[in-house]
């Protein structure tokens, strides 16, 4: 009996040891490998130009610091932290700094939607009203008389009379005109929607729902409160008329459209949006530092001035995460984590042994879905298309960003930008908390660094 007991004790220890080794092994496996640029057809010497360029922007006060990651052929070949975390301190920017993603959250919401396409639970052509009946009779607002005509004329006359004014005065004048214009509501009429509003419309910003500066949001005063959930707020949002007939224009919906998508994800999956994204995206991709609500003991990795944004996120602190309604711009993440996200897409939807999406669904997400609507929009422009929550370069020569054809990208208001070029198996993640034109210049260096 003693020998048997000893045998079981040894086997138990072996089991524990094996379990520990397995955990260590899995942790090691669920990290991207690092390599030398030359191993994957890139030039180290050219990539070093990034360091000097970023330092120029830091010295000029245009940014305080940044973390930049580049991955090619599944190897991280550049991951560098520049500058400081906080302008008022000398603390160097940590490589694992946590950044406000703002609208860089949108591709994550898009991916969650694509997963449900693969699951067969929803379809791009599904009417929104199939899941949220309030959207069946949504209307479209049509301005019948613009109120800003006289304002513009006066503004132009004033501009001529103050031609020699300081730039500060000019900026103030422009701001005053914008504020005045925003307060005025033109005469309008409401008309019936020509066809049902679809999930496709919401994912491509062709729905006309809650567009930036749109009339529909202006004439309906109801706003979400910190106590609202997607379940309570999204149906009420249907009272806002659309700013145009679905599918006829591309106009950016900073939050409204994907809030509706988020609610559809909850209804179709039977999970809260945050639980679904955590279990189907963040956990399998080992995006361990991506949060909706940054833990108290991790706030030191963010500038102090952003701590209030990282805790609470417009909801009641202590309540369930479903009370947070700004989900289309609510994630916080790191360069390392977002490289995992981008690499999964490059791999055709898989990473670390997890098939997140079918390869054909990745292609659907990153293929132009809007014809020439995005190329005609101010946010897009010539040579650009738009897929499901991501912009796509269709023509490198015509595009203002100079990106290689087939590159898909998106960014956030806080300055974060990421882009992927499938033909080169290349992804770049740029993390910062102050927008500038630096990413475009970094992109030029990255393209120059490609040897083969």
Image (spheres, rainbow, N blue to C red):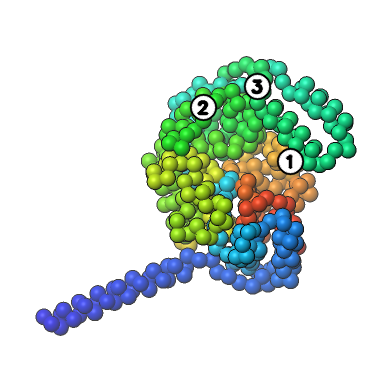
Seen in the picture, residue 158 relative to 284 is either above or below; the reply is above
Judged from the image, the secondary structure of the residue bearing numbered disc 3 is: loop
Res 139 → quadrant? top right
Residue extending furthest toward the left = 1
Category of crowding for the residue at label 2, using alpha-carbon neighbours closer than 10 angstroms: few (below 14), some (14–19), many (at least 20): few
Viewer-proximal residue among 134 and 128: 134
Label 2 vs label 1: CA separation? 33 Å
Residue 217 at least partly seen: yes
Image quadrant occupied by the C terminus = bottom right
For disc 1, the marked residue is 381
- Crowding at dot 3, Cα within 10 Å, few <14 / some 14-19 / many 20+, comes out as some
Choose top left, top right, bottom left or bottom right for residue 180. top right
Q: Label 1 crowding class (10 Å Cα cut-off): few <14, some 14-19, many 20+?
A: some
Q: CA distance from mark 1 to mark 3?
A: 28 Å
Residue placed under numbered mark 3 in the picture: 185
Residues at discs 2 and 1 in contact (Cβ within 8 Å): no
Q: Residue at x 45, y 56 (%)?
A: 296
> Tag on residue 95?
none
Which of marks 2 and 3 precedes in the sequence?
3
Using residue 13 as the reference point, say whether residue 250 is left or right of it: right
**Residue in view at x 63 percent, y 59 percent:** 88
Q: Earlier in the sequence, mark 1 or mark 3?
A: 3
The residue under the point 81% across, 25% down is 154
Q: Residue 358: image x %, image y %?
A: 50, 51
- The answer to whether any part of residue 127 appears in the image is no
Q: Which residue is mark 2?
A: 222
């Amino acid at each position: 009996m003693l020998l048997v007991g000893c045998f079981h004790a040894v086997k138990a220890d072996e089991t524990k040891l094996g379990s520990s080794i397995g955990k260590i092994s899995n942790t090691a496996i669920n990290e991207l490998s690092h390599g030398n640029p030359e191993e994957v057809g890139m030039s180290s010497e050219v990539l070093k130009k990034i360091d000097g360029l970023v330092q120029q922007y830091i010295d000029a006060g245009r940014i305080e610091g940044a973390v930049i990651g580049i991955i090619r052929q599944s190897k991280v070949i550049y991951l560098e932290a520049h500058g400081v975390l906080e302008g008022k301190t000398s603390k160097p920017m940590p490589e694992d700094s946590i950044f406000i993603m703002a609208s860089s959250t949108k591709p994550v919401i898009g991916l969650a939607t694509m997963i449900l396409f693969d699951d067969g639970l929803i379809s791009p052509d599904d009417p929104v009203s199939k899941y949220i009946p309030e959207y069946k009779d949504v209307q479209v607002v049509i301005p019948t008389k613009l109120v800003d005509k006289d304002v513009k004329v006066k503004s132009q006359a004033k501009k001529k009379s103050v031609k020699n004014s300081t730039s500060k005065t000019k900026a103030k004048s422009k701001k005053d005109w914008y504020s005045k214009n925003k307060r005025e509501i033109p005469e309008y009429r409401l008309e019936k929607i020509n066809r049902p509003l679809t999930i496709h419309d919401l994912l491509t910003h062709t729905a006309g729902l809650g567009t930036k500066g749109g009339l529909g949001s202006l004439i309906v005063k109801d706003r979400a409160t910190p106590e609202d959930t997607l379940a309570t707020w999204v149906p009420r949002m249907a009272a806002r008329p659309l700013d145009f007939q679905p599918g006829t224009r591309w106009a950016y919906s900073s939050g409204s459209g994907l809030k509706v998508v988020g609610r559809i994800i909850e209804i179709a999956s039977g999970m809260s949006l945050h639980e679904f994204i955590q279990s189907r995206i963040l956990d399998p991709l080992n995006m361990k530092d991506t949060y909706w609500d940054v833990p108290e003991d991790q706030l030191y990795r963010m500038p102090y001035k952003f701590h209030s944004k990282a805790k609470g996120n417009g909801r009641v602190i202590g309540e369930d995460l479903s009370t947070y309604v700004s989900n289309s711009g609510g994630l916080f993440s790191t360069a390392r984590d977002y490289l995992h996200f981008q690499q999964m897409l490059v791999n055709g939807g898989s990473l670390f042994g997890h098939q997140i999406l079918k390869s054909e669904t990745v292609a659907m997400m990153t293929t132009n879905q809007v014809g020439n609507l995005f190329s005609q929009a101010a946010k897009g422009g010539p040579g650009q298309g738009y897929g499901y929550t991501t912009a796509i370069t269709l023509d490198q020569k015509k595009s203002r960003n100079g990106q290689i054809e087939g590159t898909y990208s998106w960014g956030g208001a806080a300055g974060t930008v990421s882009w992927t070029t499938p033909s080169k198996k290349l992804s770049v993640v740029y993390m910062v908390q102050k927008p500038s034109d630096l990413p475009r210049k970094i992109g030029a260096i990255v393209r120059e660094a490609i040897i083969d």
